[in-house]
Image (cartoon, grey):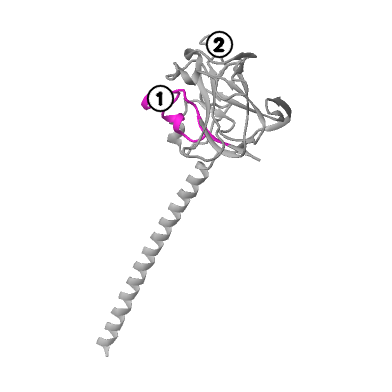
């Protein structure tokens, strides 16, 4: 009988050890799942699209298609984030550091315009010289209502390649069956002698206004065609980071 008692006790202890191992394993798995889920939620939250910036209808405008609703929108282009203008969201402290001296559009790169309307976008360009655009095609105005834009109040059709520091270029997705839409707006530099504030922003930014007509609803993308980022040919960094020098443009009913 004593032998059976000790055998039974040994079996019980072995079962307890097995259960403990299972509990430890299960707990470890659950902790791992929780960590992965938390990281996933954090990444999703940080990588979510920027808030939508909607054009505001302010009246009507006479066009070649007759009187159309007239909507307006304003975008700033800043040379780098600062305490004054925080800049777009980043997903990590490392990304924040890498992009700390790179340009961005503000307050959002996620734009919404009304369909079948005349739209005027005003750009305020706060940065200084950054070099020269590689492709002179993007130094020209394309897709505006009259083929021009207003640069500090003066109508122009193009800039000199050495005057361009960014572009606002809208195009549609490949193989798209939605209404065709292409727009290119070259944005001029502030001179090297322009007065800057303590954050490195021009006190009197370059002002560009462009008016164009939208068609039926569609989804488009836009970006800057000036090499203003870093890495290969300066088309990395802010040039390929969501919310910085490119975004989406929705034309809605």
Question: Quick check: is 165 in the magenta stretch?
Answer: no
Image vertical order of residue 142 relative to residue 55, above or below: above
Q: Let me know if residue 31 appears in the view.
A: yes
Residue 28, horizontal then vertical, whole percent: 39, 60
Image quadrant containing the N terminus: bottom left
Residue 153, horizontal then vertical, whole percent: 65, 14
Q: Let me know if residue 244 appears in the view.
A: no
Front in this rendered view, residue 21 or 44: 44
Residue at image point 52% right, 23% down? 167
Query: What is the CA distance from the residue labelled 2 to the residue labelled 1?
Result: 24 Å
Tell which residue pokes out farthest to the right in this image.
59
In the figure, is residue 184 to the left or right of 119?
A: left
Residue at image point 28% right, 79% down? 10
Q: Secondary structure at mark 1?
A: helix
Residue on which disc 2 sits: 194
In the figure, is residue 76 to the left or right of 42?
A: right
| Residues shaded magenta | 223-249
Q: Which mark is residue 234?
A: 1
Front in this rendered view, residue 197 or 231: 231
- Quarter of the image holding residue 179? top right
Residue 174, horizontal then vertical, whole percent: 46, 37
Query: Which-is-in-front pick, marks 2 and 1?
Result: 1
Q: Secondary structure at mark 2?
A: loop
Label 2 or label 1, whichever comes before in sequence order: 2
- Quarter of the image holding residue 73? top right
- Quarter of the image holding residue 232? top left
Front in this rendered view, residue 107 or 68: 68
Q: Bin the neighbour count of mark 1 within 10 Å (Cα to Cα): few under 14, some 14-19, many 20 and up.
A: few
Residue at image point 62% right, 34% down? 215
């Amino acid at each position: 009988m004593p032998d059976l008692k000790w055998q039974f006790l040994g079996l019980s202890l072995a079962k307890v050890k097995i259960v403990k191992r299972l509990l430890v394993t299960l707990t470890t798995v659950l902790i791992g799942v929780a960590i992965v889920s938390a990281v996933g939620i954090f990444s999703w939250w940080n990588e979510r699209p920027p808030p939508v910036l909607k054009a505001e209808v302010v009246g009507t405008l006479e066009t070649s298609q007759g009187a159309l609703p007239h909507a307006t929108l304003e975008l700033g282009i800043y040379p780098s984030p600062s305490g004054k203008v925080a800049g777009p969201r980043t997903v990590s402290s490392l990304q924040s550091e890498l992009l700390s001296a790179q340009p961005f559009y503000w307050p959002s790169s996620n734009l919404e315009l009304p369909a079948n309307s005349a739209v005027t976008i005003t750009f305020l360009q706060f940065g200084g010289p950054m070099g020269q655009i590689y492709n002179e095609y993007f130094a020209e105005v394309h897709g505006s209502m009259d083929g021009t834009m207003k640069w500090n109040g003066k109508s122009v059709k193009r800039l000199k390649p050495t005057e361009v520091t960014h572009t606002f270029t809208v195009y549609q997705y490949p193989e798209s069956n939605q209404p065709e839409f292409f727009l290119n707006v070259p944005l001029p530099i502030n001179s090297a002698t322009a007065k800057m504030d303590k954050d490195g922003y021009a006190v009197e930014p370059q002002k560009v206004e462009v008016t164009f007509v939208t068609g039926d609803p569609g989804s488009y993308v836009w970006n800057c065609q000036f090499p203003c980022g870093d890495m290969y040919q300066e088309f990395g960094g802010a040039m390929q980071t969501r919310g910085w020098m490119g975004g989406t443009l929705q034309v809605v009913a």
